[in-house]
Image (spheres, rainbow, N blue to C red):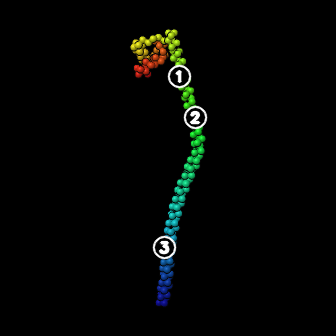
Amino acid sequence: MIDQELFLLCVGGIGFVLVCVLAYMIVKDKDISKRISRFESAIETIAKEIYKIQKTQQKLESAQASQEFLASESGESKATSDKLIALNKKLIEFDKDIDLLRSHYDEKIMSLENRLREYGAFGSSGGDIDEKKIIDMFQNGFSVDSIAKELRIGRGEVEFTLKLANIK
């Protein structure tokens, strides 16, 4: 009986120790779980802060880049604007020169046409008959130059007639 009592006492003692160890492990597990969840929340908070800092840094970098761009543009734009003003003045001068040349050559062309008319190089237009001939010849495949030679009239008159007839 003593052996049996001693055996039960040993089994009870071992059981008690196992229950204590198990209870200790459960308590430690809960404590470790709490610590891990605190670390997780701290890591999430840090990750959020890092994200906010990166966004702020990107905004600052873009603002700095735009300020540098604007600073360089203002320096360049002043020089560019001066160049554009100078080019604009030159273009206005060229336009005036071209207009003068155009009027000069228009006068020359008019005087040459008048001289040619005096010499009889241009025949007088026959009115409606020539217009009909011009239109018919053009529709039959004659070129403007060939019509002018055939009818002995100016190329411009042929083109003008075709333009009035809405053909060309």
Q: Which mark sits nearer the N-terminus, 1 or 3? A: 3
**Mark 2, residue position:** 87
Camera-side mark, 1 or 3: 1
Camera-side mark, 3 or 2: 2
Above or below — where is 21 with respect to 120? below
Spot the residue most to the top. Answer: 119
Amino acid of disc 2: Leu
Place of residue 85 in the rendered image (x, y in percent of width and height, measured from the top left): 57, 37
Amino acid of disc 3: Lys
**Mark 1, residue position:** 103
Give the CA separation, mark 1 to mark 3.
102 Å
Q: Is residue 140 left or right of residue 66?
A: left
Above or below — where is 19 with respect to 131? below
Q: In what element is the residue under mark 1?
A: helix
Quadrant that contains the C terminus = top left
Place of residue 166 in the rendered image (x, y in percent of width and height, measured from the top left): 41, 22
Is residue 140 in view from this perspective?
no
Above or below — where is 124 with respect to 82? above
Amino acid of disc 1: Ser
The 10 Å Cα crowd at callout 2, few under 14, some 14 to 19, many 20 or more, is few
Q: In what element is the residue under mark 3?
A: helix
Is residue 163 in view from this perspective?
yes
**Mark 3, residue position:** 30
